Amino acid sequence: MNLKKYFIRALHRLQKGPGYTYKELLVWYCDNTNTHGPKRIIKEGPKKKLIWFFLTLLFASLVFWQWGILINTYLSYNVTSSLSIGFKTMKFPAVTVCNANPYRYSEAKPLLKELDRLIDAALERILQPSPGNSSESITPPLDLELWHQIPLVLIDEHDKDNPIILDIFETIQSSTDTPTPKYKLAVKLSTSILSKVPLQERIRMGYQAEDMILACLYGAEPCNYKNFTQIYHPDHGNCYIFNWGMDEEALNSSNPGAEFGLKLILDISQQDYIPYLSSAAGARLMLHQQKSFPFLKDQGIYAMPGTETSIGVLVDELERMGYPYSDCTMNGSDVPVKNLYSEYNTSYSIQACLRSCFQRDMVEICGCGHYMFPLPQGVNYCNNEDYPGWAYCYSSLRSSIRHRQICIDSCKETCNDTQYKMTISMADWPSEASEDWIFHILSYERDMSTNVTLDRNGIIKLNIYFQEYNYRTISESAATTIVWLLSSLGGQFGFWMGGSVLCLIEFGEIIIDSLWITVIHIISWCKGLRQRRYPDAPPTVSELVQAHTNLGFQHEPPGSLPMDRDKEQELPPEPGTPPPNYDSLRVQPLDGLGPESDVEPE
């Protein structure tokens, strides 16, 4: 019912027309607002009025300019970083150890037989470029089809601006009159041979846990190779992870120091390395979070054979703010790139995203996948027989800045991350005085042999422990909040114009009133335009309402002529009821009544 009355009043207001003009409304606002300045404009003289108008306009412009800067600063979503140090029981990191050589040469030698002969012949051609000095005549013929898959070339850099590329197995025309050019060996070992080998066979050719892990001790508790989880890494073959947290709870560290950490003794069997494939000897290791994939090529470190390597660990926890303050992700669910490393049941990381993105582009452009990364379903690894041009396609894709930038823009950092800062120290191990009995004990525990089967070229000792029993947390917080924004906006408004929130409400009120007057003017203009276009228009709602409430109001039908003024004056007056005479109720003063008055008091 109240809503109906409101609409009826609004309809009457529209038909009645605006009650104020814009000028009257503006004068009313300047006279009644609490903002400093506008009131002086209408109350001062002409000169001061001009000065106050200019000052009010200037300071209002400054306020809006400052507001724009403050709002832009807030919408930039800047963050501040804070560092805090805490103490708590910390989880021991996951430790991944690998051999620098991915396969045992004794197991892979049958597959690499022709490759070895080709490389030996190539080196012989390089060292003895004269055809007469070569021993090619007494060796079996070479498999040049394999050679085209594994190109070895000579680069003549005698002329730096115009280097000449020569095939090693082509006849080299040399003259004793010309100086000997400077050569550089460009070697590219293709993985085409091993890419066709099944995964289980490659795992068998790698170093096994029981052969590589000789001794293990965590704190005061002994451990062995069964406490490690095996994964296959394309660069390093079989890798073993301690405290990965996949099948059981992660181990906690009770105290800092080497006595409460992880101690390992590894055998890398350097004598079984593949020639020309591994130029470095040692163990590759990495510390990382539980349930995360180890990317040893990016974050791993080497441990030298014949040494005891001690690694002190400091923990840094990073806490980033999410959208809109930073472009990070909690679990990778909002990243448009499919994580190919999810087959290992590992958590999201930006390294996994970048490699998955590259493998996706590799499959789309080259038609096959690179052996370094996991494969999508239904895709095969690249090899020279099935995909002859894959090497050139891979090289072009890897050097493409556009594709690299697409992957960088698609992948996101994790919002919460744990980083392990390492302090590394090394010493020779074992010493000359103790190496005999140490090697005897280790050889007996591994092979049950009384003979020494180990040497210092293949033995590595590792000590991994927390250096300090505290952790640092680097967290982000918003540099500007909504409270800061409102406080800054109000401070600028109050400083320049002495205003407050109520002044803004008053300004909003006059804006609404101006819009309402504009609407009334438009409706009135449309109404007048319709009446001029259609003079015989039906009565309006206000006319009908007035006719209903006033019986003397009658709407004249169209075409009727108005009555003459004289006839209108001749009409008799409407009969009416005279007002009652209430003189009898009037009280007269007593002094108005004389003693001889005939009026008797009632």
Image (cartoon, rainbow, N blue to C red):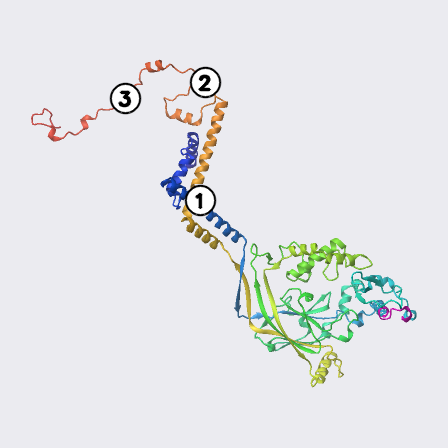
As shown in the figure, which amino acid type bears the numbered disc 1? Leu
Q: Tag 3, which secondary structure? A: loop
Q: Earlier in the sequence, mark 2 or mark 1?
A: 1
Locate residue 490 relative to residue 131 in the image: left or right.
Answer: left
- CA gap, disc 3 and disc 1: 64 Å
Give coordinates of residue 29: x percent, y percent: 40, 40
Q: Which mark is residue 57?
A: 1
Q: Residue furthest bottom?
A: 433
Residue type indicated by callout 2: Pro
User: Which mark is drawn over residue 577?
Assistant: 3
Q: Is residue 1 visible?
A: no
Overall secondary structure of the magenta section:
helix
Q: In the image, what residue type sits under mark 3?
A: Thr
Residue 193 at what x, y percent from top left?
81, 64
Residue placed at 40% from the left, 16% from the top? Answer: 562
Q: Position of residue 181 (x, y in %)?
A: 83, 67
Location of the N terminus (image quadrant): top left
Q: Nearer the viewer, residue 51 or 401?
A: 51
Residue placed most toward the observer, 292 or 201: 292
Q: Residue at x 26, y 22 (%)?
A: 578
User: Mark 2 highlights which residue?
Assistant: 558
